[in-house]
Image (spheres, rainbow, N blue to C red):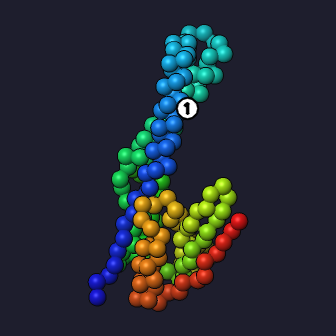
C-alpha cells in the first residue's frame, strides 16, 4: 500500500489583497505629500506621516514577500506531520511523528470570519498543537482524508469537530 502524502503552502489571496492596498496607499501619499513627508531636517507634524509611511512600507514589503513565498508550510507524509510557524527562513518548524499522535479533530472558530484549525493531541503531552488550515492552498477535505488514512494505519482517533463562537 502506498502511503499518501500532501504538501500545502499559504494561500496567496489575502497577502495579495493587503500588498495591493498598502502599495496603493503609499503611492497616493507620496503623490499627494511629495517631499514634505521625507523632510527629516526639522521636527514638524509631517514626521508623524513620515513614520506612518515607513511602517506602512514595512508592512507592504512583508505582504509582497508572503505573496511570492512558495515554500511548503504544512506536510503530511509517512514521517508524520510537519508545520512551519512563520514565513521567515529561520522560522520554527514542528515535526510530530505518527507514533506520538494520540487524537485529532477540527476546530472551527468564528469571529469576524470563520477559521478552521487542525488540533492534534500528542501522547504524554497535555498541550494540543493547533494548525490553521483555512489559510492553506489545499482543501480541508483533502487534508482530512489523509489524516483519516494515517489514523487507521497508526491507530489514533478522530474526535468530533468542535465549534467556538
- Secondary structure category for the residue under label 1: helix
Q: Is residue 69 above or below residue 83?
A: above
| Residue 138 found in image quarter | bottom left
Disc 1 residue crowd, few under 14, some 14–19, many 20+, Cα 10 Å: few
Give x and y (percent) for residue 27: 48, 25
- Residue at x 54%, y 17% (from the top left corner): 32
Nearest the camera: 143 or 151? 143
- Residue at x 39%, y 68% (from the top left corner): 75
Nearest the camera: 68 or 140? 140
Give x and y (percent) for residue 82: 42, 68
Query: Which quarter of the figure is the C terminus placed in?
Result: bottom right
| Residue 112 found in image quarter | bottom right
Give x and y (percent) for residue 44: 65, 13
Q: Is residue 97 above or below residue 108?
A: below
Residue that carries the numbered disc 1 in the rendered image:
55
Residue 57 visible in the shown view: no
Q: Is residue 5 above or below residue 29?
A: below
What is the total number of numbered labels drawn onto the structure image?
1
Nearest the camera: 121 or 106? 106
Residue 16 visible in the shown view: yes
Nearest the camera: 100 or 130? 130
Query: Which quarter of the figure is the N terminus placed in?
Result: bottom left
| Residue 128 found in image quarter | bottom right
> Is 88 situated left or right of 45 in this image?
left
Return the residue found at the far left: 2
- Residue at x 52%, y 24% (from the top left corner): 28
- Residue at x 61%, y 69% (from the top left corner): 108
Give x and y (percent) for residue 35: 51, 12
Return the residue found at the far top: 42
Amino acid at each position: 500500500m502506498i502511503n499518501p502524502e500532501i504538501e500545502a503552502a499559504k494561500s496567496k489571496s489575502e497577502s495579495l489583497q493587503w500588498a495591493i492596498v498598502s502599495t496603493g496607499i503609499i503611492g497616493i501619499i507620496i503623490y499627494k505629500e511629495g517631499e514634505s513627508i521625507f523632510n527629516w531636517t526639522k521636527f514638524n507634524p509631517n514626521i508623524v506621516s513620515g513614520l506612518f509611511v515607513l511602517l506602512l512600507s514595512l508592512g507592504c514589503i512583508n505582504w509582497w514577500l508572503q505573496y511570492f513565498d512558495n515554500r511548503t508550510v504544512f506536510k503530511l507524509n509517512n514521517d508524520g506531520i510537519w508545520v512551519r510557524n512563520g514565513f521567515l527562513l529561520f522560522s520554527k518548524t514542528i515535526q510530530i511523528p505518527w507514533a506520538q499522535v494520540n487524537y485529532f479533530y477540527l476546530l472551527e472558530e468564528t469571529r469576524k470570519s470563520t477559521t478552521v484549525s487542525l488540533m492534534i493531541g500528542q501522547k504524554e503531552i497535555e498541550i494540543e498543537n493547533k494548525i490553521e488550515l483555512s489559510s492553506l492552498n489545499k482543501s480541508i477535505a483533502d487534508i482530512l482524508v489523509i489524516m483519516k488514512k494515517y489514523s487507521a494505519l497508526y491507530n489514533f482517533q478522530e474526535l468530533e469537530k468542535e465549534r467556538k463562537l
